[in-house]
Image: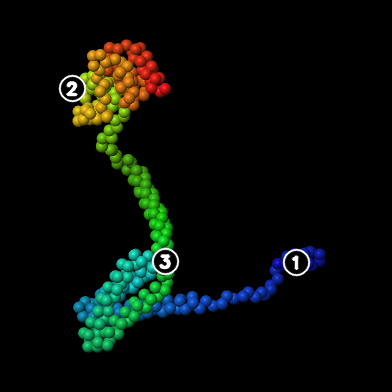
Amino acid sequence: MVRHTIDGVTRLVEEPYTTQAPAPPLDWDHALLAAVTVAAATLLLTALVFGAASGGALLSEAVPAPIAYTMASAVDSGWIICIGIEYLDRWHDERAALPRWAGWCFLIVAMAEDALNGWLHGSWPTGLTAAAVSGVAKVVWTVVMRHHAVPLTPRTRAWLAAEKADLGAQAALLAWRRQAERTKAVLAAQRAVYGDVVDVQDDSPSPLVVTREARDAVQAAISHMPGASAAKVAAQLAHAGIEIDERVVQAVVNDTASDDDTQNVHALRPAANTQIAETVRTLLRSGMQDKAELRKAVLLAHPHASPETIRRTINKLTAASTR
């Protein structure tokens, strides 16, 4: 844009001009590599056509011609497809090993098919030439791929594999989310038409959780009621104001009966001369710190004791234990 003034009025107008920019030199390496790659691809196509024609002529003696040529092209297409997969996995030797091995196997079958066709038609040179075309195409493309595949150090390969694994995980998660959204849409459409016809209920029993307080209370009741059933122990606890599931009581009873010497079983049954203070100390050593739970457990072990005496003893011993 340049300034141009007429009758005192100045405007910015476009003015064409010519400039010369340096042209980069021709990249002969890239051009040659592109030409070689195109030539190798053309050779692959030639091998496919020649192999399909030769194999189709062989198989047409047993099956109709359209089917015969389709089957013959499938054999040659097999090793060509394996070449493409091998090229895509050129950075991973382990992943490229399978398509490389399968490609050579398919190539041997295709070359044997071409040679057999020439022998059956009385022309070994034709059969060997057809087989050689496929072999040359395979070797040439292998050489081209080795040029494209830059060798990587073990650490670089490991880093690349980890990077691809992360991206693969994100892609898998994205696919799962799409599927989940489709499923939600289908369920929403079905509910709109039929309503909530599916009632999923979990009939499995809830997991049994035995807390320390519940275990201590049950063990105190067991020591006071030796030989009592779980139902009676649970009823006695409920009478004392401690609500514990009968399954929990049964679990503690079973544990106590199986091993009376384990550290989870506390000897809380008071002897004739056992004092309230000793019961409180035993409960404190077992880990019970809540005063309300302590009062219930002590009252269960000493049903005829005065609640005020129990309260004073608990306050005194808990204060001493925290010093």
Q: Is residue 172 visible?
A: yes
Residue type beneath disc 1: Arg
- Type of amino acid at the residue the image marks with label 3: Leu
Is the N terminus in the top left, top right, bottom left or bottom right quadrant? Answer: bottom right
Q: Residue furthest right?
A: 8
Q: Is residue 316 above or below residue 27?
A: above
**Which residue: 32% across, 20% down?**
281
Cβ atoms at labels 1 and 2 below 8 Å apart:
no
Q: How many marks?
A: 3
Residue beneath disc 2 = 227
Which residue is nearer to you in this view: 248 or 175? 248
Q: In this rendering, does residue 164 appear at all?
A: no
Residue hosting label 3: 152
Q: Earlier in the sequence, mark 1 or mark 2?
A: 1
The image shows residue 232, relative to residue 24, as above or below, that is above
**Foreground pick, 86 / 16:** 86
Amino acid type for the residue under numbered disc 2: Gly
Secondary structure under tag 2 reads loop
Which residue does the image show at 25% across and 37% down from the upper left? 204
Q: Position of residue 280 (x, y in %)?
A: 32, 19
Circle nearer the viewer, 1 or 2 = 2
The earlier-in-sequence mark between 1 and 3 is 1
Foreground disc of the pair 1, 3: 3
Q: CA distance from mark 1 to mark 3?
A: 59 Å
Where in the figure is residue 96, as x and y percent of width and height? 34, 67
Q: Kindly identify which residue carries mark 1.
A: 3
| 275, 99: nearer the viewer | 275
User: Which labelled disc corresponds to residue 150?
Assistant: none
